[in-house]
Amino acid sequence: MNLVFHDIIPYIPLLISGLGTSLLITVICMLAGTVLGLFVALAKSSKITPLRYFGNTYIEIFRNTPLIVQLYLLYFGMGQLGLDISPLWSALIGITINNAAYTAEIFRAGLSSVPKGLYEAGSALGMNANQTFRHVILPPAFRTAFPALTNQLVLLFLFSSVASIISLEELTYQVMNIETQTSRTLEITLIATVLYYGCSSIFVYLSNALARKVFKW
């Protein structure tokens, strides 16, 4: 079997464009999902029953239903309701909401690992509840959660390919488009594999470098 890559060269701009869209989705959805996930984790850990119920329900729904179904409901469901939403915005909203359910559990585990004595230490220093959380509780909780958040970032990048089903022109969509036009299935699949693996490895390397720099204590 001969691998013929030269037929794919004219389509390199499409690959670059698709990869850029995948990276854009990953970065935005990870940042937004991390912030939203922290609030969901706090809700689930709250002593206020309605908040705790909301946190539990949110996590159960979005972790126990397929992302592809969630994207379908958002993209096509909104269309049937008369609300036109682009594939990009559907992907950003849908993947962020889904990602938040996973980051919430990561943060919950991180918060649970913080010794109870730190809460008392914050009070002893004259801090109120918000100050204690920001300055005493959150830093060690985030440090504990960071490795799992890194893994979630990689998974998010890989799962962004699901957005191709709503015609978002990300990497997997462009790969399938190029395969249709060139019939070079193996070659374009190998290229996609290298791109996904390479970017995932870069994410891990950068995250580890950031952890060494930030978490020196």
Image (cartoon, grey):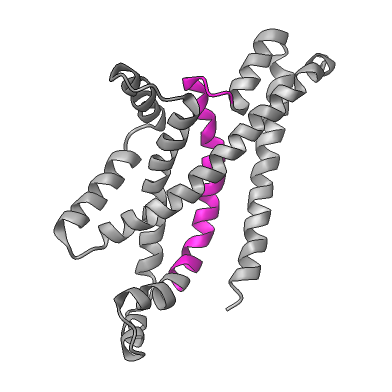
Percent across and percent down for residue 127 are 34, 84
- From the viewer's perspective, tell me whether residue 87 is left or right of residue 111: right
Give the answer, above or below, for where 188 lies relative to 117. Answer: above
Percent across and percent down for residue 214 are 60, 70
Q: Residue at x 37, y 77 (%)?
A: 131
Q: What residue range appears in magenta? A: 140-169
Q: Quadrant of the N terminus?
A: top right
Percent across and percent down for residue 49 are 15, 58
Give the answer, above or below, for where 48 lies relative to 117. Answer: above
Q: Nearer the viewer, residue 34 or 190?
A: 34
Give the answer, above or below, for where 196 lies relative to 120. Answer: above
- From the viewer's perspective, tell me whether residue 2 is left or right of residue 180: right
Numbered-mark total: 0
- From the viewer's perspective, tell me whether residue 217 is left or right of residue 179: left
Q: Nearer the viewer, residue 93 or 119?
A: 93
Q: Which quadrant of the structure image shows residue 73?
A: top left
Is residue 143 located in the magenta-colored stretch of the structure?
yes
